[in-house]
Amino acid sequence: MKASQYNLRLQKIITVIAIVLFVLKMCAWYITNSVAILTDAMESIVNVIAALIGVYSLYVSAKPKDEDHPYGHGKVEFLSAAIEGTLIIVAGLLVIYKATLSVLIHPHSIQKLDYGIILVAATALINFVAGTFCLRTGRKNNSLALIASGKHLRTDTWSTLGIIAGLILLYFTKLLWLDSALAILFSFIIIYTGYKIIRTSIAGIMDEADIELLKKLVALLNVNRRENWIDLHNLRMIKYGGTLHIDCHLTVPWYLNVREAHDEVEALATIVRHEFGETVELFVHSDYCREFSCSICYKKNCLVRLHDFKNRVEWTIENIIKDSKHRLQNLSTAV
């Protein structure tokens, strides 16, 4: 099964789980009349909507490329994540409004709190298991939709545990104001989660550089560097859903024929795909070396060398993204 199909299947399962958890939390709220439990339920209804949006976005992103979308449909995941984050913020604001009214205008009574705690605790356990699996799969398959769903479920778990702790305190102290205080506190946590999701989605839409991915790629290439790879520059990386687009310029000895240069490019591509998966689209432009390249070229037995080798340049994010061949005099990371 392809990664995109597996992602979609998992997202459908997450949607069913989200619906079941929402029903359980609404039952707990109906039984207890607790605003804090309502906060948890509001986050769950957002998870249901978000899961449905995630299913649609993964369905669209799994479509093959076409004439209108030559890079595929993966960016729809960024849009779904943005909507998801917005809904979470709205839910948080609504609960704050409800909790404030409960404190200032319409005080409420709480009943059967022990049953509510048991129901909510069960949802926390299910959330944690589902969220952990979803998050690991999303990171493995580079799926923003699955990562967003996994984070929501995990965040829901931690907030639910906090609410349970507060409800237990409320159960023994009978201080009703704790219910509204808990609701307001965890609403701010929900709002912050929504902000982070929107921030991530905007970064993807704007093709913002993913520094962590770049670090991982640069470290990988440094470890597996071949002697014919004199330098690597003008490297760019863009995520489209589960697909990773990478393009760069690879400098090789000028006397390599087309087939030999192609072999070097294929060796680089093989290393990258082995690490990041087959969904990587890699475009490498091969450049020929120049006279100033001799000082950083550590190729042995080069019959056309014009200058002695001086230092091997360690590739870093700073020098690998520049659109120029590496020269010893303007690089401070030589080793």
Image (cartoon, rainbow, N blue to C red):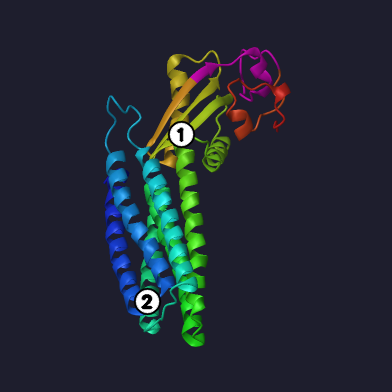
- What is the number of callouts on the image? 2
Bounds of the magenta segment: 286-307
The amino acid on which the numbered mark 2 sits, given as a three-letter code, is Asn
Q: Quadrant of residue 41?
A: bottom left
Question: Disc 1 versus disc 2: distance between alpha carbons?
Answer: 48 Å
Residue 65 on image: x %, y %: 29, 30
> Which of these two is toward me, 3 or 54?
54
Disc 1 vs disc 2: which is toward the camera?
Answer: 2
Say left or right for 64 vs 296: left
Residue 3 on image: x %, y %: 32, 45
> Which of these two is toward me, 105 or 179?
105
The residue that appears at 44% across and 69% down in the rendered structure is 160
Q: Is residue 293 above or below residue 94?
A: above
For the C terminus, the image quarter is top right
Residue 95 on image: x %, y %: 43, 64
> Which of these two is toward me, 279 or 160?
160
The residue that appears at 40% across and 72% down in the rendered structure is 37
Element assignment for label 2: loop
Local crowd size for mark 1, using a 10 Å CA cut-off: few (<14), some (14–19), many (≥20): some
> Which of these two is toward me, 81 or 135?
81
The residue that appears at 40% across and 70% down in the rendered structure is 124
Q: Which mark sits nearer the N-terminus, 1 or 2?
A: 2
Q: Is 288 inside the magenta-drawn segment?
A: yes
Residue 31 seen = yes
The amino acid on which the numbered mark 1 sits, given as a three-letter code, is Ile
Q: Is 258 inside the magenta-drawn segment?
A: no
The residue that appears at 43% across and 50% down in the rendered structure is 85
Q: Which residue is mark 1?
A: 238
Q: Is residue 128 above or below residue 261?
A: below
Element assignment for label 1: strand
Residue 103 on image: x %, y %: 49, 73
Q: Which residue is mark 2?
A: 33
